[in-house]
Amino acid sequence: MINISEVSETNMMIEKENLDVRTITMGISLLDCIDTDLARLKKNIYEKIYESAKDLVKTGNDISGEYGIPIVNKRISVTPISLVGASACHYTSDYVEIARILDKAARDVGVNFLGGYSALVSKGMTPSDKLLIESIPDALACTELVCSSVNVGSTRTGIDMDAVRLMGRIVRRTAEKTADRDSLGCAKLVVFCNAPDDNPFMAGAFHGVTEADRILNIGVSGPGVVKKALESVHGSSFEVLCETVKKTAFKVTRVGQLVAREASERLHVPFGIIDLSLAPTPAIGDSVADILCEMGLEHAGAPGTTAALALLNDQVKKGGVMASSYVGGLSGAFIPVSEDQGMIDAVTAGALTLEKLEAMTCVCSVGLDMIAVPGRTSAATISGIIADEMAIGMINGKTTAVRLIPVIGKDVGDTVEFGGLLGHAPVMPVNPFSCEEFITRKGRIPAPIHSFKN
């Protein structure tokens, strides 16, 4: 059991070191909303979301006020919409109508984002999956709170390269549809390999079909807390370094456990998992890159960066699993460029490249995240970058993702302002050589031999 003394122990973390509960995400199953009539389906979706989540924001605010723990975001994830809309949606415009009703429901209950405008196509696409994917650019252009994700690969099934090729075009079209907002639509679109069913973080959250009717998943974040702890053991051995990260992660996770218990009791919704992810923000002192520098690197991207990130990610997980029986989601360290001032500084200094970021994704929690690239980047090149990242996830049996933003009208050297938690990003160069002949091949890349475990 958690008591108030444990919360008191974290006061300094909250006040001085940017500790927060990044999100309470309510997962809602929409499977019982399915109908062959689009109008009835939309009505069912709105009513299920509204009735389930109408008290979510108030409850989060109440807990935050009572315990003094910042709860930054309240979010919703829903069943992948390609499953929910399959019977009623016959045109891409039908799916866009569902996106609009999701956006309205999210606005009316007051959450920050709603995830689940999604399709799971790691082994192939149904007609419904393809329709939804084709609708993504219009859906993200006409909504503000809806987030979209597409899972195109897994360790068990391989990589659907037809879907990878299509997603390169979809990312490009989404950028063009939202060009008047610095291609912001792409910041709400992520391509996955091995996507988890219980991820509370946007833009990749969706409510997996293995989950209960409703569930609460908590995302906790504290890069500033970890950095401050490491300052106290500056120059110590790797053993001391690891123990410090692990103990700090334990304390941070306990804060999440408290919030999870309270929210579950008040909302009468089962607690799912705590995702202990060092998810940075643009705020000074809330940076994963700064942790790496405190370990002894001049900049993130310097030789040794991948080893330092691997150490950090592993110790965060080890500390978290000792603090809660239900740690899940992504859990570890995120390396989004636009949301981490230390990463931005490293790119500006020339220490961090797209290729180095790709190497770092082998050991971090997600992948190539919130990276702005030149607006002229071709769909084939985007697909090639996605394919590379999916291969890392497939071979290593881990979640990887790509959230790439080809900013229309911008080039290397320009900076893009997204605002809020999305921050700002320098436009990074992309390898100019073509992969089009490879990407235009049809079919799937088979699963690796170690996937065959039955």
Image (spheres, helix red, strand yellow):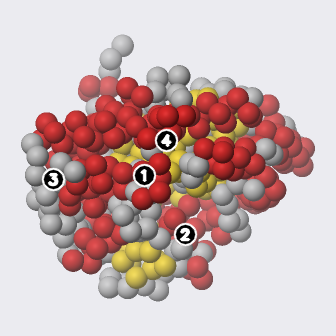
Q: Are marks 1 and 4 in contact (CB under 8 Å)?
A: no
The residue wearing badge 1 is 12
Mark 4 is on which residue type? Ser
Q: Please report the residue visible at 9 percent of the width from the left and 42 percent of the height from the top.
A: 237
In the image, residue 33 lies at what x, y percent? Answer: 81, 36
Q: Do tag 1 and tag 3 residues touch (Cβ < 8 Å)?
A: no
- Label number found at residue 217: none
Q: Distance between the residues labelled 1 and 3?
A: 20 Å
Q: Image quadrant of residue 302? A: bottom left
Which residue corresponds to mark 3?
234
SS category of the residue bearing label 1: helix
Q: Which dot, 2 or 1, sits closer to the camera?
A: 1
Whether residue 135 is visible here, answered yes or no, is no
**Which amino acid, mark 1?**
Met
Q: 10 Å neighbourhood of mark 2: few (<14), some, or many (≥20)? A: few
Left or right? Give the position of 352 relative to 387.
left
Q: Nearer the viewer, residue 156 or 310?
A: 310
Circle 3: is it few (<14), some (14-19), or many (20+) Cα within 10 Å?
Answer: few
Instruction: Give the secondary structure at mark 2.
Output: helix
Q: Is residue 356 above or below residue 129?
A: below
Numbered mark located on residue 420 in the image: 2
Say which mark, if any, is on residue 8.
Answer: 4
Which picture quadrant has residue 383?
bottom left
Cα gap from disc 2 to disc 4, whole angstroms:
29 Å
Look at discs 1 and 3 and give the one toward the viewer: 1
Q: Which of marks 2 and 4 is in front?
A: 4
Foreground mark, 2 or 3, reads 3
